[in-house]
């Protein structure tokens, strides 16, 4: 089976144990038999959609992708990938509830904000959280928290989590 993945998902593919794959930002039928890509992406070929915004999503995505290999990873194998990443490990199986109300300007950030334990509201918020690519679209002018988006941060999902969660933890 020929596998194609996007740059954002390549690290998950590697961690899952897949060695032979092609990287293409916009996978096409002729690139391979199966595309492994972010769940928001749409392609005209068989695909395995994954999410990698939160530690739990990264864990589940590694497990999901490893199922198509000859050696499916067990939970302990996947947990070992989190060892060097303090915040990713902290939030992997967390259920935090915090009294911080935030307005969020992006779907991918909603997953992260909820994982940190913040409440998403439209009015009477403490902070406005938005991805860097929407900077010019944010209507509010105070208590703005900019989060790096997919294109302005490491492709490594663990480093991405560490960066984004550190920004949000500073609000606590």
Image (spheres, helix red, strand yellow):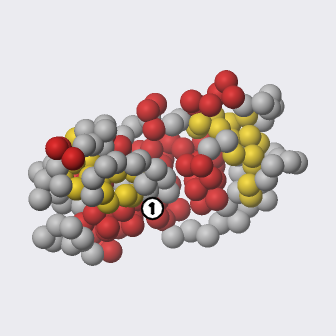
Disc 1: CA contacts within 10 A as few (<14), some (14-19) or many (>=20): some
Q: Where residue 2 sits: x, y (%)? A: 13, 53
Q: Where residue 70 sits: x, y (%)? A: 13, 70
Can you say whether 109 is above or below 18 in the image? above
Residue 28 visible? The answer is yes
For image coordinates 31% across by 49% down, the residue present is 44
- Name the residue furthest front: 44
Q: Where residue 64 sits: x, y (%)? A: 32, 67
- Name the residue furthest right: 124
Classify mark 1: helix, strand or loop.
helix
In the displayed structure image, the side of residue 114 where residue 122 appears, left or right = right
Can you say whether 144 is above or below 14 in the image? above
In the displayed structure image, the side of residue 70 where residue 152 appears, left or right = right
Quarter the N terminus occupies? bottom left
Q: Give whichever of 113, 7 is nearer the camera.
A: 7
Q: Where residue 62 sits: x, y (%)? A: 32, 62
Q: Give whichever of 148, 37 is nearer the camera.
A: 37
Q: Give whichever of 39, 69 is nearer the camera.
A: 39
Residue 10 visible? The answer is no
In the displayed structure image, the side of residue 62 where residue 152 appears, left or right = right
**Count of all numbered marks drawn on residues in the image:** 1
For image coordinates 45% across by 44% down, the residue present is 160
For image coordinates 32% across by 60% down, the residue present is 48
In the displayed structure image, the side of residue 26 where residue 2 appears, left or right = left
Image quadrant where residue 50 sits: bottom left
Image quadrant where residue 39 sits: bottom left
- Residue tagged 1: 57
For image coordinates 71% across by 51% down, the residue present is 172
């Amino acid at each position: 089976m020929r596998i194609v993945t996007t740059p954002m998902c390549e690290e998950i593919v590697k961690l899952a144990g897949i060695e032979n794959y092609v990287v293409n930002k916009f996978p096409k039928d002729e690139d391979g038999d199966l595309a492994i890509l972010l769940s928001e992406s749409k392609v005209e070929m068989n695909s395995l959609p994954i999410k990698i915004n939160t530690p739990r999503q990264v864990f589940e995505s590694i497990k999901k992708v490893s199922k198509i290999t000859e050696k499916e990873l067990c939970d302990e194998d996947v947990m070992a990938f989190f060892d060097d990443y303090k915040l990713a490990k902290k939030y992997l199986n967390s259920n935090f509830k915090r009294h911080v109300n935030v307005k969020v300007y992006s779907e991918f950030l909603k997953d992260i904000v909820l994982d940190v334990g913040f409440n998403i509201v439209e009015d009477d918020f403490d902070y406005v959280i938005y991805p860097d690519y929407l900077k010019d679209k944010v209507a509010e002018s105070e208590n703005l928290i900019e989060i790096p988006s997919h294109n302005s941060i490491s492709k490594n999902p663990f480093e991405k989590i560490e960066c984004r969660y550190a920004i949000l933890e500073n609000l606590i």
